[in-house]
Image (cartoon, helix red, strand yellow):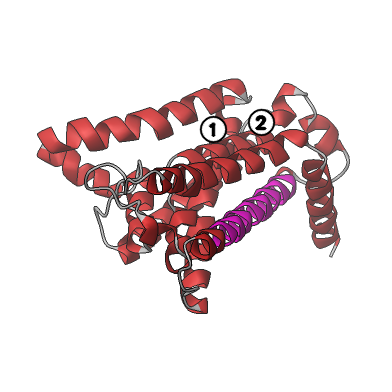
Amino acid sequence: MLDELQGVRSVRAELAKAARRPSLWLLAAVAVVLSLTFAYLIPYAGFAGGTEGPPNSDRGLAAMLPAEFAGSALAGTPVFVGALALVLGVLVVGGEYTTETWKTLLAQGPSRLTVYGAKIVTVAVGVLALTVSLFATTAIASAVVAALEEQPMLWPSVSAIATGLGAGWLITMMWAALGIALAVALRGVALPIGLGLVWLLAVQNLIASIAAPLVDWIADLQKALPGPNAGSLVAALGAAADTPGVSEIVGGGQAALVVAGYLAAFATIGGWLLSRRDIG
């Protein structure tokens, strides 16, 4: 009973602390703005100017209508929204190392794993709020486009929207969990963010675009990597194939299992390292 009370108190404390951090709200705002800019503002400006987009693009008017809004909301999660989620995970956990407050937290009674679990819950809630915000704002943007172009308001089914929300949370939480694991492993903020972003924004794209087409075993290997599976999952749910990081390399079912496996692995690794190593 005491452990449960400490766990609830730790979650409340972490949620309250996260809500007072302007940097976390800024990350969410940047994710929403980037999603709307590249999924609606720029494509609609091109459409209004008389173009349907680059050759072989999926960004015509149909992609901006309500029927496709879920795919637009998910399109950024394998790369840039995922990168922001990774930064969120690093800040929530790694900030305790930079401010040297781990010992203060633990001196109040809860165990390391209790505090770690509270931080995982806090990040999960933040990622859920981010995912819901992306879906809400893209839905509004798609409705505005449909109204401007006098198109019918045809929406995906409730089950399709719920599936998209679940997939978006799963992918962004996986990247956030990677940030948490890196923060614990490297005991800080700057280096975990740097290494995480290099992998997410550069290395995995180089593997997909340069190495995989040239070397067969690398092409097979990428089917087990987190980024390509995240891209495959959102591709299966309607994200535009010309979006960076989106490519249907494997089926949606396999992709979901692999992403969930990485999420569990990253969270477990972070907890194990925190429980085994010296805090200082």
Residue type indicated by callout 1 = Leu
Residue plotted at (42% across, 59% down):
71
Residue 225 position, x and y percent, is: 32, 44
Q: Which residue is mark 2?
A: 94
Residue plotted at (32% across, 45% down):
51
Q: Is residue 130 magenta?
A: yes
Q: Which residue is mark 1?
A: 182
Position of 71 relative to 189 (above/below): below
Task: State the residue in front, 50 or 103.
Answer: 50
Dot 2: within a 10 Å radius of its alpha carbon, few (fewer than 14), some, or many (20 or more) residues? many
Q: CA distance from mark 1 to mark 2?
A: 8 Å
Position of 216 relative to 234 (above/below): above
On screen, residue 14 versus residue 220, left or right, reads right
Q: How many marks overall?
A: 2
**Quadrant of res 55:** top left
Q: Is residue 28 magenta?
A: no
Q: Secondary structure at mark 2?
A: helix
Magenta segment: 113-141
Say whether marks 1 and 2 touch (CB < 8 Å).
Answer: yes
Residue 190 position, x and y percent, is: 60, 21
Task: State the residue in front, 32 or 60.
Answer: 60
Q: Secondary structure at mark 1?
A: helix
Determine if residue 272 is in view. no
Residue 13 position, x and y percent, is: 84, 48
Position of 39 relative to 250 (above/below): above
Task: State the residue in front, 269 or 278.
Answer: 269
On screen, residue 100 versus residue 164, left or right, reads right
On screen, residue 258 versus residue 134, left or right, reads left
Residue plotted at (59% across, 60% down):
140
